[in-house]
Image (cartoon, grey):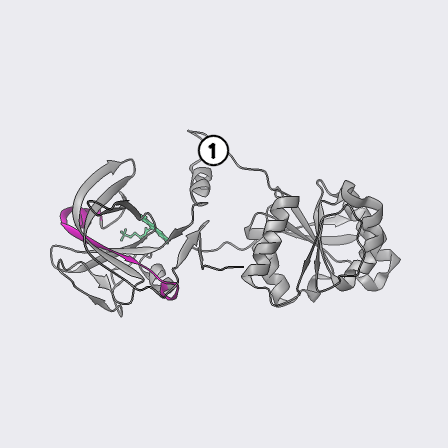
Amino acid sequence: MTESPPRIGGMDVQGQNVQGLGDPEDPIVLLIGPPERLSADGRRWVRALVEAGRHVLLAPLDEADGEGAAVALRALLTELSSRPAVLCSAQTLAAVHPALVVTGPALVSCLIVVGAAPDAATPADLPRLDLEAEPATEATEAALLGFLERHAPRQALHYQAGSDARTLRDALGCFATGVTVVTTLDEQGQPVGLTANSFSSVSLDPPLILFCLARSSSNLERFRRAEHFAINVLHIGQQPMSGVFARSSTERFDGVAWESWDTGAPILSGSLASFECATHQVVEAGDHLVFIGRVTRARFEPRRDPLLYFRGRYRRLHFA
Ligand SMILES: Cc1cc2nc3c(=O)[nH]c(=O)nc-3n(C[C@H](O)[C@H](O)[C@H](O)COP(=O)(O)O)c2cc1C
C-alpha cells in the first residue's frame, strides 16, 4: 500500500501566493503563517489533515505585518469558495484577530489555535479549539480531526450499486480491522502465506472462523487443495511482516520464524494469536472465495497490542 503524496496546487489572491495541499474539492483548512516556518510537527498535522480529506491552504501571512496581516486575511477569506477552518499559532492569533472579528462565522467555520493562548480573545460565536504546540501526538491529531468533523463536517460520500468500486472500497475501509497472515502448506510441503484482513469469527460451537481469498491470488489453488490453514493475527511490531506477505514474492518466509503444530500449516512465532484450522467449507462469493475453518488449536499472547488497518493504512490502538 503506497501512500500518495498530497496534491500541491496554488492560487494567487491579491498578490499573495497561497499554496494548497490535497484535493481542492475537500473542505478547506486555512493555515496561517509563512510555510517555511512550519515545524516538523506542523508538517505532520498538514499530512494528517490532507489524509483525512481536508484541503490545506498555506496562507503566507506574517504577524509582523500587523494591520497588513489582518487586511490580507480578510481579502483571502472573501475569495475562498467555502468557509474554511482557520488554524493559526498563538503568536499569529493577535494579528489575525481583527479580521476574525469583522468576518466572524460568516466567513470562517471554526478556529484552531496551536500553542497556549488561553487569554487571547476570539469572536464569541466562533467555535475554538486550543491545542498544545508539541508534541503532535496521535491524541492531539485525533482531537483536531474530531473538532473539524463537528464544526466543519465533510459531506458524506455515497455509493450506489453499479457506481464506482473505489467508493465502495472506501466505504468498506471505514471498518477498522486487525491484520493476519493466512498460511498453509502446498503439495510439496512448502509454506504458503499472504496478508489478509478479511478474518472474522463465525461460530463458537462448533468453533468456526473465516477469511476471504481473492480469486486473483496466485495461491488460490494451494489453499483450495490443502485441507488445513492457519490464521496468524499480527501484533503492532509485525507491521513489516504484513508488508512482506502482501508483496508478490516467492521468498515471503525467508528469515521468518515459524513452527508447525498438528497440520503443518505455518504458525508464525510470536504472533498475537494463531488459529490452526481444518478447512470446513469453501464458499464461492463473487471475486473471492470464503474459507471457513474449524479451529482445532489456538494460542494467544494476552499482553501485546494488535496491528490495525483502517482506511488503507496501518494504525495502532491509542486511548486519549
Ligand atoms: C492489510 C491488507 C489486507 C489484505 N487482505 C486481503 C484479504 O483479506 N484477502 C485477499 O485475498 N487479499 C488480501 N490482501 C492482499 C494480499 O495480501 C496480496 O494481494 C497478496 O500479494 C496476495 O498474494 P498471492 O497472490 O501470492 O496470494 C491484503 C493486503 C493487505 C496489505
User: From what the image shows, is residue 101 above or below residue 106?
Assistant: below
Q: Is residue 225 magenta?
A: yes
Q: Residues within 10 Å of mark 1 (few under 14, many from 20)?
A: some
**Label 1 residue SS:** loop
The residue singled out by tag 1 in the image is 159
Q: As shown in the figure, which amino acid type bears the numbered disc 1?
A: Tyr
Please report the bounds of the magenta region as a residue range. Answer: 220-238
Outermost residue toward the front?
205
Name the foreground residue: 247 vs 193.
193
Name the foreground residue: 248 vs 255.
255
User: From what the image shows, is residue 155 above or below residue 246?
Assistant: above
Q: Is residue 182 magenta?
A: no
Q: With 114 as the anchor, is 209 left or right in this view?
A: left
* Residue 191: image location, x then y, percent: 19, 60
Q: Write the residue at 24% across / 46% down.
A: 204
Q: Write the residue at 71% across / 40% down.
A: 81
* Residue 100: image location, x then y, percent: 81, 49
